[in-house]
Image (tube, coloured by chain):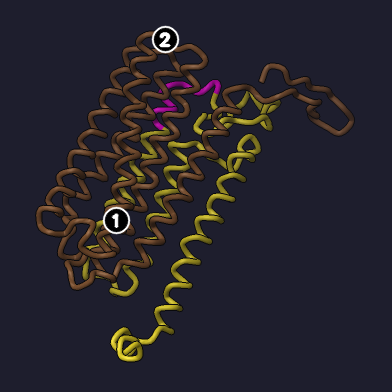
Chain colours: A brown, B yellow
Amino acid sequence: MSTIALTETHLGSAVRDWSGPASKRIVTGYGFWIFILSDMIMFSAFFATYAVLLGQTAGGPSGRELFDLRNVAIETGFLLASSFTCGMASIAADSRSTIWFQCAMAVTCALGLGFLAIEGNEFASLVARGAGPTRSAFLSAFFTLVGCHGLHVSAGILWLLTMMAQVFAKGFRADIQRRILCFALFWHALDIIWIAVFTVVYLIGSAA
Amino acid sequence: MSNGHDEVFDDTDVAPGDEHVEGGSVGQRVLGYLTGLGLAILLTATSFFVAGTDLVWEPSIPVALVVLAIAQMGVHLVFFLHITTGADNTNNVLALAFGVLIVMLVMGGSLWIMANLNHNMMPMDQLMQMQR
């Protein structure tokens, strides 16, 4: 952004001349933002499927009998806290503090793993109770939607670990900083999708 | 999120996720995340409370939950992803607006069409009898 030429004209304050291409950080972040939005559009299709199939239990168990809202509240807390520590990691990366960055990322990783453990437990107990994805259209939609979010969190944790390794090996180079920016966007976006999951799937799903 | 000394650069772009506070101290930025965290916890707690309570009229609960969820998404967008309505964020907001439009079309359209089909379809047992 240092290439911007400013000219004072009669039009008033400052009119920008042709400023040249945007900086790489802005272009990379914007491109990744487009990816995240298309990911959300993919999730919207899964949400629509779930909402349509919510009542199609084929005589099997419904959400009210299956969902344990206490677990969901703990999962929500884990993901929300991990979003906060991820923000702390971004601040640490901007101020080039390796120790704070690695600590914040490690806490984020631990919270993400805790989330996955609870979710895996829930899936295993559902399957053990005979309420697996093959039981009814409702449960197929449930496992697809929540499982897809869980896969995203798993991929995010792998990415998180590689970011920790990259900062450890290469330090806060400009390209590493751009990757950290993209990772933070991804992780915060996962939390936004989880808001929709716990509202639509669990809270509304267990009322229906 | 602009501070005093950068009004000249106010209309340049900001990458999504970046805060536009070149002079902002670490403390201020942490405070921003803490504000977001507090609001998010408040909204989440309200959601879980509303879902399990008898205090509100029951048919209104899903609507209340959806409204609370959209509010919390807004909180996350502003405090965690730093999407603002400032001039430096025009591209990010426009992309987001287009994404929201498509999401609304996909979800609203599916629910509308499927509810309509469901309403107009003959009950399954009668359909079975006709096929015989």
Give percent across and percent down for residue A149.
Answer: 33, 45
Q: Nearer the viewer, mark 2 or mark 1?
A: 2
User: Label 2, label 1: how many angstroms apart (C-alpha)?
Assistant: 42 Å
Give percent across and percent down for residue A146.
Answer: 30, 50
Q: Give yes or no for contact between labels 2 and 1 (Cβ–Cβ under 8 Å).
A: no
Seen at 89% across and 30% down, the residue is A10
- Judging by the rendered image, the residue that carries numbered circle 2 is A171
Q: Is residue A207 above or below residue A150?
A: below
Tag count in the figure?
2
- Residues at discs 2 and 1 both on one chain: no
Give percent across and percent down for residue B8.
Answer: 70, 26
The residue type indicated by label 1 comes to Thr
Seen at 39% across and 50% down, the residue is B72
The answer to whether residue A167 is magenta is no
Q: Is residue B52 above or below residue A83?
A: below
- Judging by the rendered image, the residue that carries numbered circle 1 is B46
Considering the numbered disc 1 on the image, is that residue within a helix, a strand or a loop?
helix
Tell me the chain of label 1: B
Q: Start and end of the magenta stretch?
A: B22-31
